[in-house]
Image: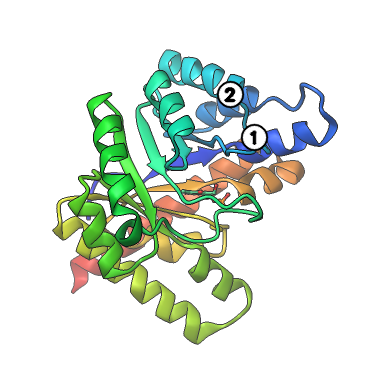
Amino acid sequence: MGARLRLGVNIDHVATIRNARGEGYPEPLRAAELAIAAGADGITAHLREDRRHISDADIVALSDLCRRRGRPLNLEVAVTREMLDIALAQRPHAACLVPERREEITTEGGLDVVKGRAAIAPAVRALRDAGARVSIFVEASADQIAASADVGAAVVELHTGAYCEAVRHGDVARAQNELDRLRTAAADAVGRGMEVHAGHGIDYATVREVAAIPEVAELNIGHFLIGEAIFVGLQHAIGHMRALMDAARLDAMRSDSRT
Ligand code: PXP
């Protein structure tokens, strides 16, 4: 079991609320500051092609904040010329390549690295050459993990959406199957020399099993935390998530040492 599990807080949906009114508040930058104060190990933001939440100006401000506060900014972008140019100009600590369809409500699946290899490989190279740690958001499948390693990604972020959805719908068999897939993919990725992150759809009920996967080094969590912050405040929501992650890791380590 590796070092302390990191928590990246995705603040996109603070911008979603701001943009609903076209006003300047609530500010994603303020959320990022609070998240860091509450123990976030990094800030994640997705600059979408349609700018439905995070804006170009947000990315500039977040980059500056993260640099000043010594926390990594994980910039999620689609593999397009425009997004790569922005990422190359900002030189974030980390860049996560994600699929994007304009009509989707959220990032519905992983990037198909097998099919998109020809475009993804040079994007990974360019970002890596600019000093970014490159991750690719993928489904937990052996061929996507292998292709991610082939194109030179340092990190894969496993899409946890299917697992989380199955838990929320009470589909125990599907949840177990999805969890097994995540565990297998995580071990596979580490075996190929990559770091493993995980994210999408994680809430208090689903964080435990994902955090207990020993190969996972970082979780990226957004929508649930921002929603929960409406009721209990961002610092409390992050603090509670952090505590659940730590407890899950500790339990997993204890049961590991007993076997
Ligand atoms: N990781 C990636 C790559 C994502 O695209 C997203 C959603 O933007 C997340 C993590 C966070 O997902 P959620 O907002 O459901 O917690």
For residue 51, the mark is 1
Q: Is residue 177 above or below residue 105?
A: below
Label 2 – label 1 distance at C-alpha: 8 Å
Q: Nearer the viewer, residue 131 or 28?
A: 131
Label 1 Cα neighbours within 10 Å, binned few <14 / some 14-19 / many ≥20: few
Residue found 24% across the figure and 58% down from its top: 147
Name which of mark 2 and mark 1 comes first in the sequence.
Answer: 1
| Label 1 CB-ligand 1 distance < 8 A | no
Residue found 47% across the figure and 42% down from its top: 78
Task: Report the residue that reaches farthest toward the right.
Answer: 21
- Which residue in the protein does label 2 denote? 56
Question: Mark 1 and mark 2 in contact (Cβ < 8 Å)?
Answer: yes
Q: Is 128 on the left-hand or right-hand side of 97? A: left
Q: Is 227 on the left-hand or right-hand side of 205? A: right
**Residue 4 at x, y percent in the picture:** 31, 44
Label tally? 2
Give residue 184's quadrant in the image: bottom left
Quadrant showing the C terminus = bottom left
Q: Is mark 2 on a helix, strand or loop?
A: helix
Label 2 Cα neighbours within 10 Å, binned few <14 / some 14-19 / many ≥20: few
Q: What element carries label 1?
A: loop
For residue 182, the mark is none
At label 1, which amino acid type do we have?
Answer: Arg
At label 2, which amino acid type do we have?
Answer: Asp
Q: Is 257 on the left-hand or right-hand side of 52? A: left
Residue found 64% across the figure and 38% down from its top: 50
